[in-house]
Amino acid sequence: MTQSLWWYVALVVLVGFERVAELVVSLRNAKWSFAHHGVEFGKAHYPFMVALHTGLLAGCVAEAIVSGRPFDPKVGWAALLIVVLMQGLRWWCISVLGYQWNTRVIVVPGLSRVTRGPYRFLRHPNYVAVIGEGIALPLVHSAWITATVFTLLNAPLLAIRIRTEEAALSTVLTR
């Protein structure tokens, strides 16, 4: 493997560790939410979301290794910058939502919708991070097939997820 490919694999592994950190936060927040009478919505689509996001990481590495495409500095460095910015946006969302953030859709009755931080500008800024990363992470090392497949599979799943969240929030949160 080339040196750039080793660095790319290391990047994808780091993103994988970041996902594990998200799951730790998510489990903590789920425990808090359920202790405060949280209600979970959209359980059926969650395993597909987990599989797709896991597949993104595996696809990035597999395509980069199998394709043998070289690192393209113009695309790769720009894509890496986007990945870093999307991580920042994701953790901004997590920090602003606090215990209300989760990888699942769990809503605690009586809480208000968060409208500060990135939520001042967008209803679902975390999904901007998901979309940006899903395109940019594969493109860091020219894995354009993975970027395309993830984007095409993620679009309908994200539509389901957003509808689920909107329905859940409209039923249990105060305005």
Image: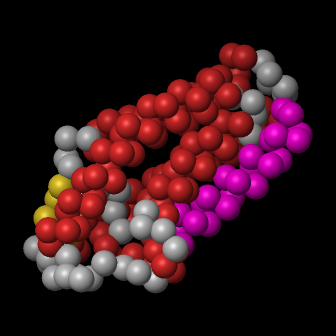
Rendered location of residue 33, percent (x, y): 21, 72
Classify residue 101 as left or right of residue 3: left
Q: Quadrant of the N terminus?
A: top right
The number of discs equals 0
> Which sits in the foreground, 78 or 152?
152
Of all residues shown, which one is farthest toward the left?
37
Quadrant position of residue 99: bottom left
Give the residue drawn at x 24%, y 53%: 164
Secondary structure of the magenta portion, mostly? helix
78 falls in the magenta region: yes
Residue 174 on image: x %, y %: 19, 82
Q: Does the magenta stretch include residue 146?
A: no
Magenta residues, start to end: 71-92
**x then y, percent, for residue 59:** 57, 28
175 vs 24, left or right, is: left
Question: Camera-side residue: 59 or 107?
Answer: 107
In this view, the residue in front, 141 or 45, is 45
Task: Please report the residue visible at 20 percent of the width from the left and 41 percent of the height from the top.
Answer: 44
Q: Which residue is drawn at 49% across and 64% down?
A: 125
**Residue 173 visible at all:** yes
- Residue 102 lies, with reference to residue 55, above or below; the image says below
Is any atom of residue 31 visible in this view?
no
At horizontal 61% and vertical 58% (from top left) the residue drawn is: 86
Quadrant for the C terminus, please. bottom left
| 3 up-or-down from 25: above or below | above
Q: Where is residue 72 in the image (x, y as percent from the top left)?
A: 86, 34
